[in-house]
Amino acid sequence: MANILLGATGSVAAVRVPALFEALVAAGHAVKVVATDAATYFFDPASLGEHLVRDADEWPGREAGHRYERGDTVLHIELRKWADAFVIAPLDANTLAKLAVGLCDNCLTCVWRAWDLARPVVLAPAMNTLMWQHPFTRRHLKAIAADAGAAHIPMHLNDQQLIAQMNDRSKTLRIVSPISKTLACGDVGVGGLAEVADIVTAVGEILDKVKG
Ligand SMILES: Cc1cc2nc3c(=O)[nH]c(=O)nc-3n(C[C@H](O)[C@H](O)[C@H](O)COP(=O)(O)O)c2cc1C
């Protein structure tokens, strides 16, 4: 199947990262996880063992005073070369904003900034309903979609129509809509991470689309 780099950010939905990892492996993929520091608050890093890359892994031996030496590998570039597809699930509001403008201050966002735009990406946002409904969210998704070949999407569309058009028009981008539910914070509304099975299906579909 494919080499999948699973990016995990600091949404409470990161509790599902181990389950998503297992489901992608069960679908036949080789999977590595790159997690932000905030993401690792929500799951036990030990549960992913050697498959997990943390931010600190970009700077080996830093605490002990080790310096970069010519010939040392650059981890985010190695991950980008290895990955056939980049799946960021859950994608929180903070990292969504960074992706939209190209900020790269951790391993995950450096992979994104160095990404080969011919390769597929899957984004599964998860956030509080008012964060999701804030105008920033559309602005950021629209910028990312434009860079992925889906420009000039009309902004009067509702969320479902907007995301459907982005997914239709881009060959490499698949946004998996958040779902409506009672969120961890107690609010009821859109913003919950899509079901694990739906994210795995989206990964298979975008891999086929890019191949076809
Ligand atoms: C308990 C808790 C739950 C959170 N859940 C979410 C969430 O679901 N979505 C979101 O966008 N931010 C959420 N946040 C805020 C992010 O963790 C915060 O913006 C953080 O800086 C994100 O860092 P990262 O993007 O580098 O992972 C949550 C924070 C806390 C403390």
Image (cartoon, rainbow, N blue to C red):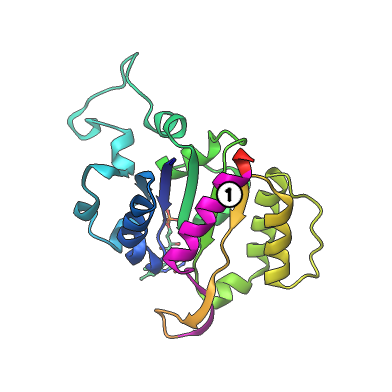
Q: Residue at 23% across / 42% down in the picture?
A: 50
In the displayed structure image, the side of residue 168 where residue 121 appears, left or right: left
Give the amino acid at mark 1: Ile
Q: Residue at 67% across / 56% down in the picture?
A: 167
Q: Quadrant of the C terminus?
A: top right
Determine if the magenta segment contains residue 176: no
Tell me the magenta residue range: 187-209
Determine if the magenta segment contains residue 208: yes
Of 69 and 127, nearer the camera is: 127
Residue annotated with mark 1: 206
Q: Residue at 46% across / 42% down in the picture?
A: 105
Question: Where is residue 136 drawn, in percent x and y?
Answer: 65, 63
Q: Is residue 162 visible?
A: yes
Question: Where is residue 49 drawn, in percent x and y?
Answer: 21, 47
In the displayed structure image, the side of residue 159 where residue 194 appears, left or right: left
113 shown above or below 168: above
Question: Where is residue 63 drawn, in percent x and y?
Answer: 21, 35
